Image (cartoon, rainbow, N blue to C red):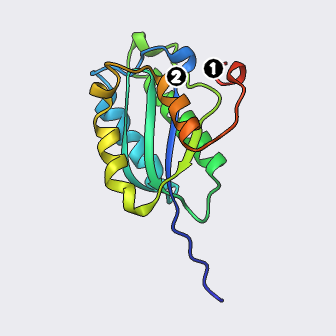
Amino acid sequence: MPQSITFNYSHITFSTKNRFPFIDKNIENELFSYITGICKNLEFTPIKVGGYKDHIHILCILSRKTTLMKFIEQVKSHSSLWIKKKGKEYENFYWQKGYGSFSVNPTEIDIVVQYIENQENHHKTKTFQEEYLAFLKKYKIEYDEKYLWD
């Protein structure tokens, strides 16, 4: 086969360092747009970028040219530098070291988009840690919790 074809949806999530609530109403929409631009520049097709005070969700189609690890590295480094320039209250901004990436069935894209759009309401009753642990459980991923939150 002379042509390489990939079409993989991924739901990526990661938090701010120590889950500090840096992502406030002053920067959230601009941050989500900025991350959408990074996705496009790296040939990851963004479907929905959103999040809440201490974390981000990215639903995208993975690039066939750039590894996921390189993509996350670029998103974190560029957006972190961008946020730090947004004002004194953001000077100490950092992302956590790790991330989660979960495959998404194409028939469930609308469900994930809705989930990302509903983050503010969702987090009235559940923390990011609870949300993340639910993802790990859903995907039957074994983990040691002492390594999740450093």
Residue in front for this viewpoint, 55 or 145: 145
Q: Position of residue 137 (x, y in %)?
A: 57, 36
**Residue in the image at 29% along x and 39% along y:** 117
Direction top: furthest residue: 89
Residue 69 percent across, percent down from the top left: 66, 46
- Residue 149 numbered mark, or none: 1
Query: In the rendered image, which quarter contains the C terminus?
Result: top right
The quadrant in which residue 124 appears is: top left
Label 1 CA crowd tier, 10 Å (few <14, some 14–19, many 20+):
few
The three-letter code of the residue at mark 2 reads Gln
* In the rendered image, the vertical position of residue 51 relative to residue 39, given as above or below: above
Q: Is residue 133 left or right of residue 60?
A: right
Label 2 packing within 10 angstroms: few (<14), some (14-19), many (20+): few
> SS class of the residue under badge 2?
helix
Spatial CA span between label 2 and label 1: 8 Å
Q: Assign the N terminus to one quadrant of the image.
A: bottom right
Where does the image place residue 86, in percent across and percent down from the top left?
A: 38, 21
Amino acid identity at mark 1 = Trp
Mark 2 in CB contact with mark 1 (< 8 angstroms): yes
Locate residue 139 relative to residue 54 in the image: left or right.
right
Please state the total of marks drawn on the protein image: 2
Q: Identify residue for label 2.
A: 129
**Residue at image coords 31%, 34%:** 30
Q: Is residue 147 above or below residue 12?
A: above
